[in-house]
Image: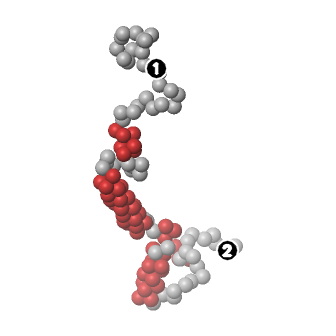
Amino acid sequence: RGRSAGPPAAGALPRPLGADAHEDEPMLVAQRKNPDYHGFSADPAADVLNMRAAFLAGISIAIVLGSVFLHYLPDYGLQQWAPREAEIQVRERERRGLPLLTSDYYDPKCLCLPRPE
């Protein structure tokens, strides 16, 4: 009755506040079809399957690579090296017939000491 004869979009009202301007985005369309959308596929069954496969692979990789990383860390604080080295030193001293421990830290023959006066 009082409308113009132009195209229908010309007299369209603006969108109300809160209306989404990106209605045609594939993620929003998939979320409308599947409220439990995980972002892998528009098909709900394939989406769940791909999500579970990615989760399993991610956790498995984290556990396996994390374990390998921890296994091959260097000997922190030389806790494994020190007992092995001590055992080698004990065997060497026993082979030479020397006492296992001496009161001298350095060999007194190799030290240049001042002459007593």
Task: Give whichever of 12, 114 is nearer the camera.
Answer: 12
Residue 27 horizontal/vertical position (percent): 37, 41
Q: Residue at x 36, y 45 (%)?
A: 33
Q: Residue at x 45, y 68 (%)?
A: 75
- For badge 2, the amino acid type reads Pro
Q: Residue at x 45, y 77 (%)?
A: 85
Residue 100 horizontal/vertical position (percent): 51, 86
Asked whether residue 50 appears in the rendered view, the answer is no
Asked whether residue 52 appears in the rendered view, the answer is yes
Q: Write down the residue under mark 1.
A: 13
Q: Give yes or no for contact between labels 2 and 1 (Cβ–Cβ under 8 Å).
A: no
- For badge 1, the amino acid type reads Leu
Looking at the image, is 11 positioned above or below residue 78? above
* Placement of the N terminus among the 4 image quadrants: top left
Q: Which mark is residue 27?
A: none
Q: Write down the residue under mark 2.
A: 116
Indicate the quadrant where residue 8 lies. top left
Looking at the image, is 95 positioned above or below residue 55? below
Say whether residue 37 is left or right of residue 43: right
| Element carrying mark 1 | loop
